[in-house]
Image: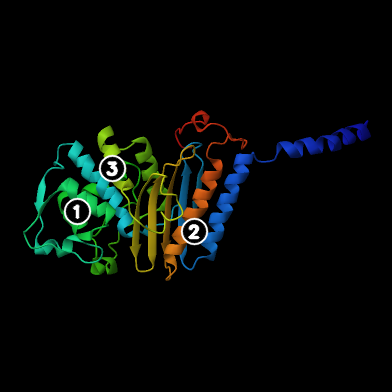
Amino acid sequence: MRHLVLAFCVAALPAAHLLAQPAPADQLAAKLQRDLDTIAADARGVVGVAVVDLTSGRRLEVNGATVFPQGSAIKIPLLVELFRRADAKELSLADRVTLTAADRTGGSSLLQHFSDGGSAFSLHDLAVPMVVLSDNTATNMLIDRVGMDRVNATMAAMGLPNTKLQRKMIRQQDQAAGRENVSTPREAVELMVKLSRCDVPLTASSCAEVVRLLELPKGGAFRQPIPAAVPVAWKPGSLDGVSTAWGLVRLEGAPYAIAVMVTFGDAEVDDVVRRVSAAAFAHFRQVAGATPLGARIAPALVKKPGPPR
């Protein structure tokens, strides 16, 4: 009898082994995780990544909870707060601000070349160069009207307490004093997920306008691996040794949100962001229009985005 039981157990082993295998979609996601881990390990510097599949809710991370300096990517929370305050009637997007010599800020800024007192811009119009040109003068003018504390309070209320605007643009003395603009890959990607579903304290029209502004054309390492026909709402950031990007990639059949951050980097820091973006897009292009088992069907029949898990 003992021999019969042993024989039965041995015979059942292959079937049990097969049942223990991960599903094909899980195996494919594991490959992307390995690719991200390899890119991070090979990079000179510290790399953080968070990716959310907006169809399945699957999340992948590298150093997801690590706090990174953000550069201009922090302008996305500022943009959200601008529209939140407008929706709350605390200010109007049509309010006009006159640019003065005191507003002029170096770095990436077209407005720094405008005359003292010669131009007035609506708050909405200031948001355009802030997003498209990463204009630091426009950004600092908006910070004056919107308020750093208000930005941080809204991020905290949204469950993003480590996403903080703590200084104006081009303020190395503030950086030296520890007042850096920061976030984590996990929180940055969560903000992009929330924007994708309008799960933010904005009206539907304001949420749509924030996404539209972020989709306005701009160049950068993160955008390069993604075909121009694919809508991408995103904002890059850079400092010496730092490169970041927060993005919402609306690939048909496989939309995803992603945040990439590199610090302590070298001259190749932007290439790290490019490689992460390329790996993520290659994965989701493979997933687009496929069932969980990998068979390709009409994109309209693929499960629509649901709440992340």
Q: Tell me if residue 201 can be seen.
A: no
Colour approach in the figure: rainbow
Q: Is mark 3 on a helix, strand or loop?
A: helix
Q: Where is residue 288 in the image (x, y as percent from the top left)?
A: 52, 39
The residue pinned by badge 1 equals 143
The residue pinned by badge 3 equals 210
In this picture, residue 25 sits left or right of residue 89: right
Q: Where is residue 73 in the image (x, y as percent from the top left)?
A: 33, 55
Q: Position of residue 302 (x, y in %)?
A: 52, 31
Residue farthest along the top direction in this orientation:
301
Q: Tell me if residue 250 can be seen.
A: yes
Q: Position of residue 202 (x, y in %)?
A: 26, 36
Q: Is mark 2 on a helix, strand or loop?
A: helix
Q: In this view, does 47 lie above or below 286?
A: below
The foreground one among 150 and 114 is: 114
Residue farthest along the bottom direction in this orientation:
267
In which quadrant of the rendered image does the N terminus lie?
A: top right
Which corner quadrant of the image does residue 194 belong to? top left
Residue ID at (46%, 38%): 252
